[in-house]
Amino acid sequence: MKKKKVIIIVSALIIVAAIGLGIYFAVENSGFKKDPADTEELYRQNVAEAGYKNTPETAIPQTDIYTLIDDHFRSPLEKGKTVKKALVIGYDGCRADILAEIQDGESGIKALTDNGAALNLAYCGGVNYPEKNTQDTSTAPGWCSILTGTWADVHGITGNDITKTMDTKTLFTSLTEEKIIGSAAFITKWAGHFSRKNATYLDEKTYCEENSLPVSFVKCSDDEASFSYTMEELAKDDCSDFIFSILEPTDSAGHGKGFSFNNPVYKEAFKREDLYAKQLIDAMKSRSTFAQEEWLVIITSDHGGIRTNHGKESIQERMTFLVADYF
């Protein structure tokens, strides 16, 4: 009887261990793909802890970023400055709540807030949460709304894999065509922007080339290459006046392991791109001509995410952020 009891106990322990390993590998493999703890309540709590000056209810439209950039270049130069420049660093797929993870150290966002910049919540999707979005909370619609200052009812990009017509021009084209700026550079690794069939800015790239507009459309192999190219651009004496560089560690981590504040892989991806941004800002400030230049620096996102995707109407997908500062 005792032997039978021992066998039962051992068998039970083996089963428990097997279940435990199964749960571990399920979680490990799912990568927070179905994170029940990623609730709206927790999301709002983390957003509040991040230090935003506004709330989800008073979030600003991401289209306002267009106006911020356009006004910067069209306004008079400050005394002692000879040229205006702008650096926009995009954190693709970066949720607004993850900014609660920012700590002292190598942070691009903190480099701006420590200099006096405010941290603002923004929204994508055409209308603010909780209204049903009028365009996908996805990459192409988000960045296109930022670059054109309009929503999909005007620019036509309701989702990915739609080519924008030239009825609505981006800042790259309008600012160079009007000779407001001398040059612009669009740096990204995602082929969906201008490097494949049905890419968003395929016609705009062709338009710039045919009209000899000084806009560089740079497709990089990965995030490291995008970062390196942007660093090299900032190191040039005659760097582009308008640099728009998109980094994608958070989007890649979200699609692979899950868009979640609880996901350590997603957190590390955020810290990686935030470190990239800090180094880019440092490179800008190290320019030999920096004292004569009037810079606008913006860090923002196109959309958030939930589980392993985005595009819908949850608050986790709808909220983005904006931090902007002048140097």
Image: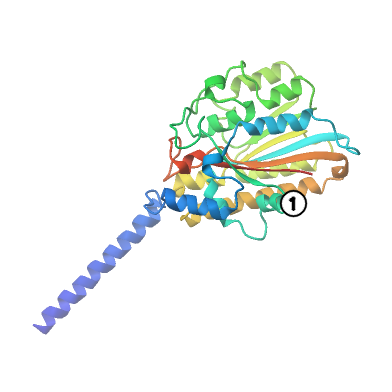
Is residue 216 rendered to the left or right of residue 1?
right
Determine if residue 115 is in view.
yes
The amino acid sitting under disc 1 is Asn
Is residue 73 rendered to the left or right of residue 201?
right
Depth order, front residue of 10/268: 268
Q: Which residue is mark 1?
A: 115
Picture quarter with the N terminus: bottom left
Is residue 108 rendered to the left or right of residue 271?
right
Residue found at the very far left of the displayed protein: 1
Identified at 60% across, 49% down, the residue is: 52
Residue found at the very far bottom of the displayed protein: 2
Identified at 65% across, 19% down, the residue is: 206
Q: Is residue 60 above or below residue 283?
A: above
Q: Position of residue 25 (x, y in %)?
A: 35, 58
Q: How is the image coloured?
A: rainbow
Depth order, front residue of 133/225: 133
Picture quarter with the C terminus: top right
Q: Position of residue 223 (x, y in %)?
A: 61, 44
